[in-house]
Image (cartoon, rainbow, N blue to C red):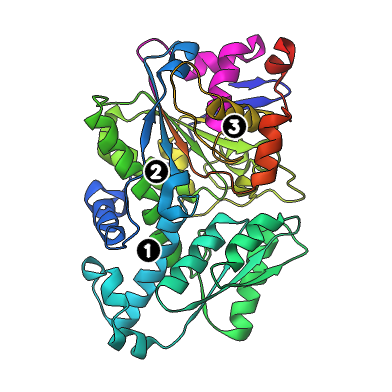
C-alpha cells in the first residue's frame, strides 16, 4: 500500500520468500549497555535529554511526544560521536589485546598504550557529523584523521572537522562515491578506514559503529520508563545508509520484544534506498545512484548498509520518502514551541519526523499515511533529533525566512 502526494510517499513492510531474521545478541540490551559503559568513561559523557512536548502532543492529538535531543552530545552537536568513538576504541583495543569489556578512555590513553600504538591514521568519508566524530575520537585518543567529503559540502561542516585537527578533502562525487575515494586513499596510503556501512570483508567496524549509535536508544528507553512511558507506541528513525536506524531498531526490538513501537523509517525522496528496497518486495537491498540534492545532507545516501538492511527489513513497519519541506517544517516546529514546550534546535536531518507527524495530521492528501501510522489519543511518539544546527546559516534561514514550506503550511500563510 502506498500513499502518494507531492511531498510524501510510504510503503508498508512486505512479505517475501524467506524467514525474518531475529535481532541477535549484537543489539541486545546487555550488549548495548556494555557499549554505553565504555562511553561513560569519557569525561564528556552525559545522557542527552529526552524532552516531553505536551503542547505538540495536543496539536497531534496524541498522549505524548518525546524528543531525544542529540544536539547536546559531547558538545559536538550530533549523536555520531557514539559510533565513531566506540569503533576507534574497539580497533585500538584489539591491537593492544584489551577485551571489549575492559576498554576505557583512560586505559587507551595510558603512556604504554600510546607508545605501542604510535600514531594511526583513521580514514573516513562523511557528509559532516560522522567525520567530525572520527576526527574528535582520533584526536582524543592520540591519533590522526583523514576525512573525505562529497561535493557541495557546506563550509561550516568542513570547518568543524578541521577544528578537530583532521586533514579534509572535498571530492567531486556524491556520498557513496566519496566512500570509494576514501577506500582508495586508505589502500594507497595505509591507515584504518572507519565507515558506517559494510562491504565484503569489512564488517567489524561498521558493526561497532552501529552498536555505538544504539546507545541513543538505550538511553531513551530508560528515560521513557522513568517518565512513566513503559511502551512508546511509535518510533521514527531517519535513515541514510541506515546504521543509526538499524541500531536503534535492533535495541527497541530487544528491549520491548513483541510490544516494540511501530517503527517508521524516513528518507529523503532523492535518496530513499530503503524505500526502494522494501518496495521491490524481494527481500534484497537495492542501491540507487545519481544526484541526491536534499537539505537532509546526513541522509543523502543511495546504498543501504548490508548489516543494517536485514534489521530494518524485518523490524520496521513503514518506510517513508519525503520532500525537504517536511524537514524544514520539523525544524520550525521544534524551534517554535507550542504552549509551554521548550525549544529544540534540530538540524535538517534531525527534524523530519516532527514534520512528518504534523503533515499526516494536517494535510488531507495524507489520509492514507495517517491511517497506516495509526496515531491516536493513546499514542506516545518517540522522536530522535539526531543533530543540532550543523549548518547554522541555513538553519537560521529555514526558521526566519520560512524556506521550503509544506503544502499545508503554505495554505495557512
Q: Main secondary structure of the magenta part?
A: helix
To which residue does mark 2 refer? 248
To which residue does mark 3 refer? 331
Q: Earlier in the sequence, mark 3 or mark 1?
A: 1
Between 328 and 248, the one lying in front of the other is 328
Q: Are marks 1 and 2 in contact (CB under 8 Å)?
A: no
231 above or below 98? above
Residue at figure coordinates x 67%, y 64% from the top left: 178
Left or right: residue 8 versus residue 68 is right
Discs 1/2, front: 1
The residues tagged by marks 3 and 1 sit, at their Cα atoms, a distance apart of 29 Å
User: Where's residue 38, x and y in %?
Assistant: 28, 61
User: For numbered disc 3, what is the local secondary structure?
Assistant: helix
User: Where's residue 376, x and y in %?
Assistant: 42, 11
Between 170 and 158, the one lying in front of the other is 158
User: For numbered disc 2, what is the local secondary structure?
Assistant: helix
Discs 2/3, front: 3
Between 41 and 91, the one lying in front of the other is 41
Q: Residues within 10 Å of mark 2 (few under 14, many from 20)?
A: many
Discs 3/1, front: 3
Q: Residues within 10 Å of mark 3 (few under 14, many from 20)?
A: many
To which residue does mark 1 refer? 86
Residue 295 in view, yes or no: no
User: Where's residue 374, x and y in %?
Assistant: 45, 15
Amino acid at each position: 500500500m502506498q500513499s502518494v502526494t507531492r511531498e510524501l510517499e510510504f510503503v508498508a513492510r512486505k512479505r517475501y520468500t524467506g524467514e525474518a531474521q531475529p535481532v541477535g545478541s549484537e543489539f541486545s540490551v546487555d550488549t548495548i549497555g556494555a557499549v554505553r559503559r565504555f562511553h561513560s568513561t569519557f569525561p564528556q559523557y552525559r545522557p542527552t535529554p529526552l524532552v516531553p512536548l505536551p503542547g505538540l502532543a495536543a496539536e497531534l492529538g496524541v498522549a505524548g511526544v518525546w524528543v531525544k535531543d542529540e544536539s547536546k552530545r559531547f558538545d559536538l552537536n550530533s549523536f555520531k560521536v557514539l559510533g565513531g568513538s566506540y569503533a576507534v576504541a574497539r580497533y585500538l583495543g584489539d591491537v593492544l589485546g584489551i577485551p571489549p569489556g575492559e576498554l576505557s578512555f583512560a586505559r587507551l590513553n595510558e603512556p604504554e598504550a600510546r607508545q605501542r600504538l604510535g600514531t594511526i591514521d583513521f580514514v573516513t568519508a562523511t557528509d559532516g557529523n560522522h567525520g567530525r566524530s572520527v576526527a574528535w575520537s582520533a584526536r582524543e585518543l592520540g591519533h590522526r584523521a583523514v576525512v573525505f567529503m562529497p561535493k557541495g559540502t557546506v563550509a561550516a561542516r568542513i570547518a568543524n572537522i578541521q577544528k578537530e585537527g583532521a586533514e579534509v578533502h572535498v571530492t567531486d562525487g556524491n556520498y557513496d562515491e566519496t566512500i570509494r575515494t576514501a577506500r582508495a586513499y586508505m589502500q594507497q596510503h595505509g591507515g584504518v578506514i572507519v565507515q558506517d556501512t559494510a562491504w565484503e570483508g569489512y564488517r567489524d567496524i561498521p558493526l561497532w559503529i552501529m552498536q555505538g549509535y544504539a546507545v541513543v536508544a538505550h538511553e531513551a528507553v530508560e528515560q521513557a520508563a522513568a517518565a512513566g512511558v513503559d511502551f512508546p507506541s511509535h518510533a521514527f528513525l531517519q535513515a541514510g545508509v541506515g546504521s543509526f536506524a538499524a541500531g536503534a531498531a535492533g535495541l527497541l526490538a530487544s528491549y520491548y520484544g513483541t510490544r516494540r513501537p511501530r517503527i517508521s523509517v524516513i528518507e529523503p525522496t532523492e535518496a530513499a534506498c530503503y524505500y526502494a528496497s522494501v518496495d521491490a518486495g524481494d527481500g534484497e537491498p537495492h542501491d540507487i545512484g545519481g544526484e541526491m540534492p536534499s537539505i537532509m545532507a546526513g541522509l543523502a545516501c543511495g546504498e543501504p548498509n548490508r548489516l543494517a538492511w536485514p534489521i530494518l527489513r524485518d523490524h520496521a513497519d513503514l518506510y517513508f520518502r519525503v520532500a525537504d519541506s517536511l524537514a524544514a517544517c520539523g525544524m520550525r516546529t521544534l524551534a517554535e514551541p507550542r504552549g509551554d514546550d521548550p525549544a529544540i534546535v534540530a538540524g535538517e536531518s534531525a527534524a523530519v519526523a516532527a514534520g512528518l507527524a504534523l503533515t499526516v495530521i494536517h494535510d488531507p492528501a495524507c489520509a492514507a499515511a495517517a491511517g497506516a501510522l495509526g496515531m491516536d489519543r493513546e499514542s506516545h511518539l518517540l522522536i530522535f533529533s539526531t543533530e543540532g544546527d550543523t549548518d547554522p546559516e541555513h538553519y537560521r534561514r529555514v526558521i526566519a525566512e520560512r524556506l521550503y514550506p509544506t503544502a499545508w503550511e503554505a495554505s495557512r500563510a
